[in-house]
Image (spheres, rainbow, N blue to C red):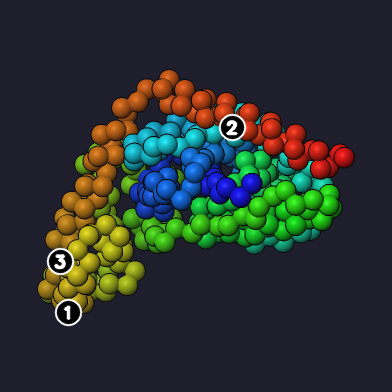
Amino acid sequence: MNTRTILSGDRPTGKLHLGHYVGSLTSRLSLSQQATYSNPLKILIADTQVLNNDVSKSEHVKANILHLMRAYNAIGLKNCQFILQSEIPYIFELGTYLSNLVALNHNLRNPTLKSERQMYGDNLNMGFVNYPIMQTADILIFNATDVPVGEDQVPILLYGNDLIDKFHFNFNCNIFQKITPILSSSPRLIGVDGKNKMSKSLDNAIYLDSTDEDIYQKVFSMYTDPKHIHVSDPGQVEGNVVFMYLDVFHSDKEEVNDLKKQYQKGGLGDVKLKKMLFEDIKNVIAPIREHYYNLSDETLLAQLQEGSEMAFEEARDNIKRIKSFIFR
Ligand code: TRP
């Protein structure tokens, strides 16, 4: 019972970019290689959850699932179990049981929900209000214990732990292990405009299947210091996107520090820095891009089906066990 299982989840909302790579993908890679976990890393593709944000996006979900599968394979993730959420009806069954344990106002006060809610205004659907419950069901149906997430998702996991307490108290049992958030140590990568997080609509993202030309164009459009006009001018490092990216992608940290000093003093041009960064990013993307279109759609979908079938069995066994404590 005390085995630990990692489950991570992704909403299939678009093509994956460098922000995903430094944020969640590399941490998955290292988690999947850790010998401390006897079970394979579970990766849940939360297709149903996409509808909570916007039902009109449903027509893109299939293509985006393939983008996720391509990215997982291209970065070299091995020994993982891929699960498609909508293939596991027991998640939604467990969600229904759990939803009776929570007061509506409690959900509306959740910090993650509160901040994401602002994006939707009055168009908030019931699924969205329920999503902390459903996400807890994603985790508990597989007895997962360790969940890698971004900072913004932590309140949802703490909410899940609350829900576990409520379940245990109400049904007088002790069947779920608490959820431990695993936070990635890498910083959030801002878009090349330096203002917003990477997004398709803002055209400020560098995608994992970018050509060298795409990368070059994006790097050379990066926001630097608008007051740094001549090479000899002193320039600002804070808020300078090129330096933010060099901090992440340039392996020689000492060199970056020297460059920062030189830039602040004056005498270092943006073009030189951007050329360097272009090489660094090219080195990350080139091997990923090479594998991105290696596998056919059929192979990727078969991988997903295999993992989902196994998950279906696991979830069916678990819901039986869970129900035996609800309806004694
Ligand atoms: N809400 C998560 C996100 O947007 C995705 C997700 C769905 C998830 N189900 C999950 C994450 C279960 C962890 C565990 O990033």
Q: Which residue is mark 1?
A: 265
- Name the foreground residue: 161 vs 204: 161
Queried on whether the Cβ of the residue with tag 2 lies below 8 angstroms from ligand 1, the answer reads no
Residue type at mark 3?
Answer: Gly
| On screen, residue 313 above or below 163 | above
Disc 2 from disc 3: Cα separation: 54 Å
Residue 229: image location, x then y, percent: 19, 69
The quarter of the picture where residue 106 lies is bottom right
Q: Check disc 1 and report its element: helix, strand or loop.
A: helix
Give the secondary structure at mark 3: loop
Amino acid type at mark 1: Lys
Q: Quadrant of the C terminus?
A: top right
The circle drawn on residue 311 is: 2
Q: Earlier in the sequence, mark 2 or mark 1?
A: 1
**Residue 157 in view of the camera:** yes
Residue 234 at what x, y percent from top left? Answer: 19, 77
Decide: is 214 above or below 223: above
Check disc 3 and report the residue beneath it: 269
Say what secondary structure mark 2 lies in.
Answer: helix
Are the residues at dot 2 and dot 1 in contact (C-beta closer than 8 Å)?
no
Give left or right: position of 203 versus 177.
Answer: left
Q: Are marks 2 and 3 in contact (CB under 8 Å)?
A: no
Which of pointers 2 and 3 lies earlier in the amino acid sequence? Answer: 3
- Frontmost of labels 2 and 1 is 2
- Residue sitting at 17 percent across and 68 percent down? 255
Instruction: Give amino acid for label 2.
Output: Ala
